[in-house]
Amino acid sequence: MLFTRRGTGTGRHRLGLAAVTALSLGVLTACGGGSGSSDDAPESTTIKDLVVDVLAEPDSLDPFYRNTAEAQRYYRLVYSSVLQWNEDGTLAPDLAAELPSVSEDGLTWTIKLRPDVTFHDGSALTAADVVHTIEEAQDPENGAVWLSGVAYVKSAKAQGDDTVVIELTEPYAYLDSKLAMIPIISDEDEYAPNKTYATTGNGSGPYRFESLKRGDALKLVRNEDYYGDAYKFETVTFKVIPEDASRIARLTNGESHIVPDLPTDQVELVSKRGAKAETVENNVSRLFAYPSMNADRPTSNVDFRLAIANAIDRQRIVDQVYGGAGRPNSTYLTYGTLHHDEELGESFGEKPDLDKAKEHLAASGVDLDRKLNIIAVKDPNVVSAATIVQANLKELGIEATVDSQDVAGFYANLVSGDYDLILFDSPASTSTGFAPDYVNGGLNSKAANNFAKFKDEQMDALLDTAMTAQGEEAQAEAWRAVQERDVQTQGNIQIAVSQISEAWSNQLAGYQPSATLWLNTLRDVK
């Protein structure tokens, strides 16, 4: 289960308006023989109530508040977007009646909406709702995760009920991918961040919110008024089962039907127990550390961050934590993404460079009189990686502690900067839409989801150039400059990328895991 090496690639991955996913990292098929079609299994008509066992629930159901896997699995079923992703990485109309038309100068996008769409509360979905959604995403007070995706929108206006016209300040190469990611909300709901939709929902998607029991289950019911083809299952329940052994047992004894985020080293075990399992080649997760940028924290010092970056044993983490289904990583713009530069992605190497780490530590002038605190998101893989980082830092002469918390537990610290390092794993470009501009959301000083509050004027300028560069050659050059600056500054300390494994029941005839981080392929189960 090893990632194979590829040459540095910046090949074209977009065809007209269709953004094509480039997340394949060339991983060999997961050992254990668990992959493959389940067409020979019993028909899935026996399953009316689909149960998905998850490690954790979303800390909020607000589709503007989070873009984590836990959140998107929920709101991609409850909300619709203007466009949608196909599994081959192309874009298709969703709420749009057809793909948008774009002016020759790239500044005007015209979107025709399909008729007779309603929200779950029965109100009509019109162009005014799309305009409302864009304006709420643009409002910096809302802190929407989609803020950077609408940064170049000058105006959005409704022309009647079925047409939206978007004017841009500059040609923005990735607006189509954002139109497939931003969930459309109703203008009849007065939006308040993490309040209006925090524990309920009002979308137009194939399922509607039914109930939420914190720490136990989140239940959805099929939307019988859905404008598209009806989904197979009457209900979808996300059941919170944090223990891997329990999730595997529930799957193999028929209590559940899908287990996302399966540890890669458990693929063979699941297969031997009669269920399906595979490593999803195109679904890539990035392991990194948020460094606090508060002035009183040692991690606000760039040399201190570079000391940490050079001290980490990335290959040990790949081998021991991810069973080899991963790669060391040094750049935010990660492997498989359009315009990723593989040479820069390997800048910190597979093994620690303690001499260089000590040089940066000395240059930082930091002399810690306490232990460095590492918070690891409550995920077995991330916690295991954190203990390896802890040991690496000890070799550098830095004592550290590891504290495991869920997102809700450490989020206040992340926002306030009251921490040293927070280890986290996050989907790569799937989190914002199969395009390199997810980097802008994490490293631009003005982005709402730049949680570490990294601020670097040179990086801001480089990102602005990359976001608006026209033509493949100019875009490749601009994104390489971003990656060069990233290696020099490490606004997020990059550690590794890994591929996600998934298990599913033999009863799910025709089901295959999605290349996205949400359950995109449920619509294909007939």
Image (tube, rainbow, N blue to C red):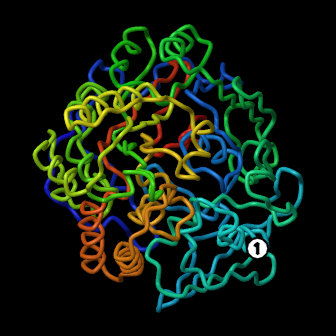
Direction from residue 279 to residue 149 in the image, left or right:
right
User: Outermost residue, left direction?
Assistant: 355
Q: Position of residue 250 (x, y in %)?
A: 57, 12
In the foreground, 507 or 258: 258
Residue at x 38%, y 35% (from the top left corner): 371
User: Can you say whether 482 is above or below 231 in the image?
Assistant: below
Q: Quadrant of residue 363?
A: bottom left
User: Can you say whether 389 is above or below 11 in the image?
Assistant: above
Residue at x 59%, y 24% (from the top left corner): 53
Look at mark 1 in the image and give the residue it sits on.
127
Residue at x 66%, y 67% (from the top left corner): 137
Q: Quadrant of residue 187?
A: bottom right
Q: Position of residue 425 (x, y in %)?
A: 43, 41
Q: Quadrant of residue 497?
A: top left
The N terminus - image quarter: top left
Residue at x 74%, y 35% (from the top left corner): 220
In the foreground, 233 or 55: 55
The C terminus - image quarter: top right
Direction from residue 349 to residue 58 in the image, left or right:
right
Three-letter code, disc 1: Ala
Q: Residues within 10 Å of mark 1 (few under 14, many from 20)?
A: many
Dot 1 lies on which element? helix
User: Can you say whether 63 is above or below 135 in the image?
Assistant: above
User: Outermost residue, bottom direction?
Assistant: 105
In the foreground, 91 or 350: 350
Q: Position of residue 11 (x, y in %)?
A: 24, 66
Q: Position of residue 316 (x, y in %)?
A: 21, 30
Direction from residue 282 to residue 99 in the image, left or right:
right
How many numbered discs sit on the rendered protein?
Answer: 1
In the foreground, 104 or 250: 250
